[in-house]
Image (cartoon, rainbow, N blue to C red):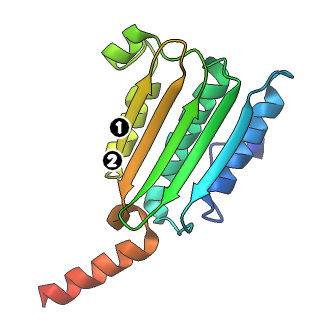
Amino acid sequence: MQWRDCVCSTVVTNDLAQAIRTLGAELADQGDSNSPDFRIDVDGTPRDLAPIVRDDVYRIAAEAVRNAFQHAQAARIEVEIWYDQRQLRLRIRDDGKGIDLEVLESGARAGHYGLPGLQERAKVVGGKVTVRSEPGSGTEIELTIPASVVYASARGRRTIFRAKSAS
């Protein structure tokens, strides 16, 4: 196994947008000349993510981005990251073929763990994943995680507050 093939801790610099941008470039390089247009937009001031949470946030994004590149047959894939006071919101949207209605209704494709894995990983870190898709109209996957859970500085303040109020 080569280093680039490893599923290592991704956000060494804690720059979520850069980590996702790098993944998108790698996936585009692996595809044919018809790779989708890949774009990342960041709203708000990027904040350091709590180390325990950041890898799961990246893995949720990576799974959604990989699925869009591999299965959506999309012309465009967009990732939007919002850093705001109340929450981190991450949305991956494509204009591809959409997820089969049967898969959406059942929540999973037989023998695949993509959608259930996203839901489970989000739940573990205190977040929520919402999946919207219509056949022929693309897919949108949105992750929201409360600020008190995801931002490194918010987690520190909460810990200090609890310690003071306990005495």
Residue 79: where, in percent of width, then height?
A: 60, 43
Residue at the spot x=45%, y=66% of the render? 50
Residue 60: where, in percent of width, then height?
A: 49, 41
Q: Quadrant of residue 29?
A: top right
Q: According to the image, label 1 marks what residue?
A: 120
Q: Nearer the viewer, residue 45 or 119?
A: 45
Tag of residue 133: none
Q: Nearer the viewer, residue 67 or 131?
A: 131
As drawn, 8 above or below 93: below
Tag 1–tag 2 contact (CB < 8 Å): yes
The answer to whether residue 65 is left or right of residue 153 is right
Q: What element carries label 1?
A: helix
Residue lying furthest left: 167
Numbered label tally: 2
Q: From the image, which quarter does the N terminus lie in? A: top right
Q: According to the image, label 2 marks what residue?
A: 124
Residue 105: where, in percent of width, then height?
A: 32, 14
Q: Quadrant of residue 123?
A: top left
Q: Is mark 2 on a helix, strand or loop?
A: helix
As drawn, 101 above or below 33: above
- C-alpha gap between disc 1 and disc 2: 6 Å
As drawn, 143 above or below 107: below
Q: Which of 33 and 118 is in front in this view?
A: 33
As drawn, 53 above or below 122: below
Residue at the spot x=49%, y=48% of the render? 90
Q: Is residue 104 visible?
A: yes
Q: What residue type is labelled 1?
A: Glu
The answer to whether residue 89 is left or right of residue 10 is left
